[in-house]
Image: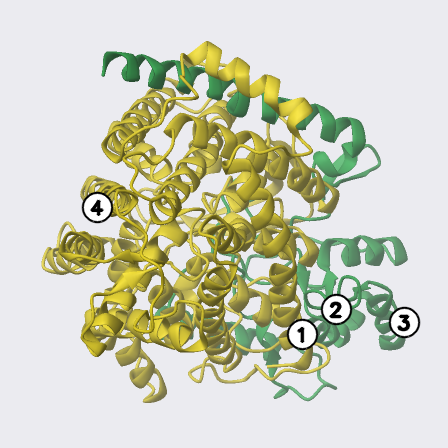
Amino acid sequence: MTANGWFQIGLFFLLILLIARPLGIYMTRVFERRKTFLDPVLAPLERTIYKLTGVEAEKEMRWTEYAIAMLLFSFVSMLVLYLIERIQAWLPLNPQHWPGVPAVLALNTAASFTTNTNWQSYVPETTMSYLTQMAGLAYHNFISAAVGMALAIAFVRGISRREQNTLGNFWVDVTRSILWVLLPGSIVLALALVSQGVVQNLHPYDTAHLLEPQKVVTQDSAGKPVTQTITTQTIAQGPVASQEAIKMLGTNGGGFFNTNSAHPFENPTPFSNLLEMLAIFAIPAGLTVTLGRMTGSPRHGWAVFATMAILFFAGVTTAYWAEAQGNPLMRGVDQQVTATQAGGNMEGKEVRFGIANSALFATATTDASCGAVNSMHDSFTPLGGMVPMINIMLGEIVFGGVGAGLYGMLIFVILSVFIAGLMVGRTPEYLGKKIEAFDVKMCMLYILVFPLLILCLSAVTVLLPRLGLSSLANAGPHGLSEILYAFTSAAGNNGSAFAGLNANTNYYNLMLAITMLGGRFFMIVPMLAVAGNLARKKIAPPSAGTFPVTTPLFTTLLTGVILIVGALTFFPALSLGPILEHLLLYAGKTF
Amino acid sequence: MRKQIITAILYTVVTTLLLGIAYPLGMTVLAHFLMPQKANGELITQNGALVGSKLIGQPFTGPGYFHSRPSAAGAGYDAANSSGSNLGPTNATLIARVQQSVQAWQASQPQNVAVQANVPIDLVTTSASGLDPDITIAAAEYQVPEVAHARALTEAKLKDLVQAHIQPRQFGELGEPRVNVLELNLALDRLTALAHTPQPVSR
């Protein structure tokens, strides 16, 4: 670990702190439909969209109507994505002439992008046409993020409204998320990324002539060695910057290329790397300020922010430390930090990012439900790789996905308030709202669906040698980590992977599609039920017995509840995966 | 309900046209107008032929060139098939591969150099993308004696060339300092021509 490494981590967090407040206040204005500086351009566009689609912008929706609109939109857009993938061979903008995507893979991908997961079982540069990437995948990057924001705002309205039956209008919230936040942000970010070298074109792939032609020994179909001379390099191209921008800003994380933000055309410089990491956290951090503003308690927003900050620093410190240690099994190599190299565990990492930026990116991308990677998590040290896994297992509430992070965190807030109420023997209250049996039941449903999906499906998969285990790239405890990470990532709608696992099989494509859909929609519905129920309640004035949600005590309690729920649920599984692997690594055992 | 379904369908169509077609095409036009070189991948041409991209690594494995890192992308640096090795830290294949690379590096050092010097870690590990265009300064300096020997250049002259190709941290603080292998080797070829024959990949 170096002083410069810590400086870069500190700088990143400082910038997030500076962005959060103005962005949060701006988003408050957007969702309260007040005036903003972009109105002259966007207001006419907004009206046109409502007119073309028949949206009645002034009509408020009950939580059930809101949920139905959300489910219908998700279903229709998922179906369209599936169709685009299947028929891409006959559509334009396919210069490499890729055939239609096979059915099960197309289903998995459609579920993946609709749920903001962006799990990728395929190699994009050898599977997807430019049109599929633009109009199918990048499009879902916009709308799955906009749906997440709309849901978070609906939840916040549930907290702040008194004795009302409605939570706002789903279509209006989605449209305003897109037009006022995601689209302008993406345009600016895409141009900044192009300035760093992220490509943006519709050309066929280029062919370069290698400076030093390579003789490569491969095996033919009969298993005999064949020597080939390779003289050219095919360089994949595409409309990358436009997709990269919304991929990060919407915490989607689905790469234009197979290796995602490690690919030099997606993330060419340390500055592009910083921009991409800032884009992951910007909106989720801003939403904590929006929460404070919309509920009339800005300090509550900052208390939630503080919990997130504590968990973020715990994660990044562990990951940075673990990766800087290097691999004790490698002999005759120099893994020390010096002025001329970053040292540490460099398998699966890029030289321009080194250790600090790889550990920071891995932490940020799993704190949020982004899932973009700039290094290969599968090749992390056992403890370094456990950090991203734990981040997702805690529910991605450390800033979290766009929208999803905030409503996930608010479920934990309600649980914390409930526990505090039990400790002092009073009816728990949250910002003046009494928390009752129905609310807690729905919160517990939200919290239990998640480990149920992860642990049950991982367990089933481990018991299936031909369907489950044959896809593993690594044996021993690391193999368990690969399976556990896959289902954790899918249920958490993250999308990053221990990518050695060959998930492009019918079994994994189907199981993971089910996990992703369950992890999104089975959790959203109870969440909206809580919001709808809260909106109906009276707001009682605070009394001496009210547990304040603006203090360091609250931040401590909330952090504790998150860690205890996460630890009790997942510690047994983790101890058989990364923790066991760590012990065996230092005992000198390989698999 | 029927009205909601119609809205969902119309909304999908309208927003697809805006976000899936107009936005990426608009950005493509804008990028080509403002930064054409960057939007096309910072391609390098020499004598009218495309020799690569500044951002994408190329394989160099024979004597007389600075070597890139090992690559897990296709047969090595396949820029239409990016990939990491995804081997875990306790994977026996990974450890064996690294030890083989270490031995090859130490064996390839000229006689006058201490053969037991530890190899910089990036030279024996695959990158995340399999297309890493860079090596660390330590890795470039480690290779100076061997390349100097093969090119019949003085080590001092080659060290100067490496120094001139160091990319420092961006804005003085961001990322890690590094050396772009393709650019370094292109400069090396301009310094002295090398009549070479392709060698089999050994690491």
Q: Which residue is painted at 30% across and 43% down in the image?
A: A535
Chain of the residue where label 2 is placed in the rendered structure? B
Q: Could you tell me which secondary element the residue under label 2 belongs to?
A: loop
Mark 1, mark 3: which one is toward the viewer? 1
Report the residue marked by disc 4. Answer: A526
With A554 as the anchor, is A36 left or right in this view?
Answer: right
- Which mark identifies residue A7? 1
Q: Residues within 10 Å of mark 4 (few under 14, many from 20)?
A: some
Chain A on-screen colour: yellow
Q: Nearer the viewer, residue A558 or A282?
A: A558
Q: Residues within 10 Å of mark 2 (few under 14, many from 20)?
A: some
The residues tagged by marks 1 and 4 sit, at their Cα atoms, a distance apart of 42 Å
Vertical position of residue A207 compared to residue A323: above or below: above
Report the residue marked by disc 2. Answer: B173
Mark 2, mark 1: which one is toward the viewer? 1
Q: Which residue type does callout 2 highlight?
A: Glu
- Quadrant of the frame with the N terminus of chain A: bottom right
Q: Which residue type does callout 4 highlight?
A: Pro
Q: Could you tell me which secondary element the residue under label 1 belongs to?
A: helix
How many marks overall?
4
Label 3 near label 1: C-beta < 8 Å? no
Report the residue marked by disc 3. Answer: B157
Q: Are marks 4 and 3 on the same chain?
A: no
Mark 2, mark 4: which one is toward the viewer? 4
Q: Nearer the viewer, residue A196 or A551?
A: A551
Q: Which residue is painted at 55% across and 43% down in the image?
A: A27
The residues tagged by marks 2 and 3 sit, at their Cα atoms, a distance apart of 29 Å
Label 1 near label 2: C-beta < 8 Å? yes
